[in-house]
Image (tube, helix red, strand yellow):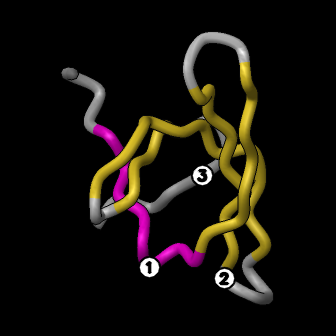
């Protein structure tokens, strides 16, 4: 698995929207992500790093 870093685009392993990584807290293994729900609503949430996969650049 590629190392996730701020600025990367990720997705939940179970699917869902593409999300941008804002910051990472290595002490508690949390990744803060933001994404748009629909056109205008900005969402943000922390996820455990293990549930995320990095999107490949060629998409």
Total labels: the figure holds: 3
In the rendered structure, are the residues bearing label 2 and label 1 in contact, judged by CB atoms less than 8 Å apart?
A: yes
Counting residues from the start of the chain, the first of labels 1 and 3 encountered is: 3
**Disc assigned to residue 27:** none
The crowding category of the residue bearing disc 1, from other C-alpha atoms within 10 Å (few below 14, some 14 to 19, many at least 20), is few
Q: Is residue 45 left or right of residue 47?
A: right
Task: Say which residue appears at 75% left-offset and 88% top-offset.
Answer: 28
**Which residue was labeled with disc 3?**
5
Label 1 or label 3, whichever lies nearer to me, is 1
Magenta span: 48-55
**Disc assigned to residue 50:** 1
The crowding category of the residue bearing disc 2, from other C-alpha atoms within 10 Å (few below 14, some 14 to 19, many at least 20), is few
Q: Secondary structure at mark 3?
A: loop
Instruction: Name the residue at the top extreme.
Output: 39
Residue 4 picture location, percent across and down: 51, 57
Task: Say which residue appears at 37% left-offset and 50% top-offset.
Answer: 54
Q: Nearer the viewer, residue 49 or 14?
A: 14
Instruction: Name the residue at the bottom extreme.
Output: 28
The magenta stretch spans residue 50: yes
Relative to 37, residue 17 above or below: below
């Amino acid at each position: 698995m590629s190392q996730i870093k701020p600025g990367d685009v990720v997705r939940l392993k179970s699917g869902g929207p593409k999300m941008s990584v804002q910051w990472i807290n290595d002490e508690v293994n949390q990744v803060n992500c933001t994404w748009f729900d629909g056109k205008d609503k900005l969402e943000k949430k922390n996820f455990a790093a293990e549930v995320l996969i990095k999107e490949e650049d060629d998409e």
